[in-house]
Image: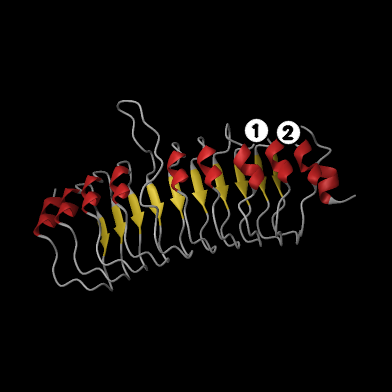
Amino acid sequence: MSLFQTATRMKYLTRLNVYNHGLTEVPHTLGSLSSLIEFRISRNQLASLPSEIALLRNLKVFKANHNNLTEFPSGLLALTNNLERVELRYNMLTTLRVEIGHLNKLLFLDIDSNQIDHIPPSIGRCVSLRVASFAANLLIDLPFQLEMPTLEYGDFPRCNQLVLSQNQLRALPSWVGALIALCRLNIWYNKLTTLPHEIGSLRFLQVLRADLNSIVMLPPSIGDCRSLRELGLSSNLLTELPDTLANLEE
């Protein structure tokens, strides 16, 4: 009896880890594991996943790093009530579907090292997102605007770590300044020539890594990032720094 034939008979199974098994497919019977909370299937040879993942209504954690997936698993997009963590590093994804904005409980999204050249504005509707990592993709531009929902008074976007390193970004959009909970921003190894004025709104930003770009000027508003403790600017084209950086002294 195969691994999955056995597993899918365990109807009360809450965690399933099939790391590094040389798997080329996942059976449709996976959907019978309705109690599953964590599903880890990294380091296999999967090119796709069955739509029956949508039946895993209790799933919170999904990890499928180091596979051959070409599309964001469509079944995950239906898990709007519980899905909190998605890891799809080192696959062959080329895009994200607009429906990703339906994942309003998503806390952690890691799709590093794929072939993504576009991020949909709808990702702004992932209101619970804390960590978003898009390093080592093919991004040239980010959405001009995000589809951010209207927040209640006193609430704000919760993302505290944004990773955009190792892409081909030419500019950062002004909405970066709206991510006021941001503590870490990694944008090293891109094609940036400056940073937006709105970066000064990031009062909780502690780490800004902007090494290996073509930055010729920093906006004076960077001096308003009063929590900044690590500023990486190596291998850029800067000839001077704004005097406002003196504001960072405690």
- Residue at position x 36%, y 52% from top? 144
- Residue 28 in percent (x, y) is at 79, 45
Secondary element at image label 2? loop
Label 1 element class? loop
The residue labelled by disc 2 is 34
Place of residue 9 in the rendered image (x, y in percent of width and height, measured from the top left): 84, 38
Identify which amino acid the numbered label 2 is placed on.
Answer: Ser
From the viewer's perspective, is residue 237 above or below residue 126? below
Residue 224: % across, % down? 17, 48
Residue 210, compared with residue 106, is above or below; it is: below
| Labels in figure, total | 2
For label 1, the residue is: 58
Instruction: Give the image location of residue 154, x and y in percent.
Output: 30, 27
Q: Nearer the viewer, residue 141 or 134?
A: 141
Mark 2, Cα crowd under 10 Å, few <14 / some 14-19 / many 20+, is many
Residue at 68% x, 52% y is 41
Asked whether 246 or 180 is in front, the reply is 180
Residue placed at 27% from the left, 70% from the top? Answer: 234
Neighbourhood count class around disc 1 (C-alpha, 10 Å): few under 14, some 14–19, many 20 upward: some
Farthest residue toward the left? 243
Badge number at residue 213: none
CB within 8 Å, label 1 to label 2? yes
Task: State left or right for residue 188 relative to residue 46.
Answer: left
Q: Nearer the viewer, residue 67 or 119?
A: 119
Going by the numbered disc 1, the residue's amino acid type is Asn
Residue at the outermost top position:
153
Q: Nearer the viewer, residue 209 or 149?
A: 149
Q: In the figure, residue 35 lies in which quadrant?
A: top right
Q: In which quadrant of the rendered view does residue 83 lie?
A: top right
Question: Which residue is at 28% across, 48% downward?
Answer: 205
- Which image quarter: residue 75? top right
Mark 1 → mark 2, Cα distance in angstroms = 7 Å
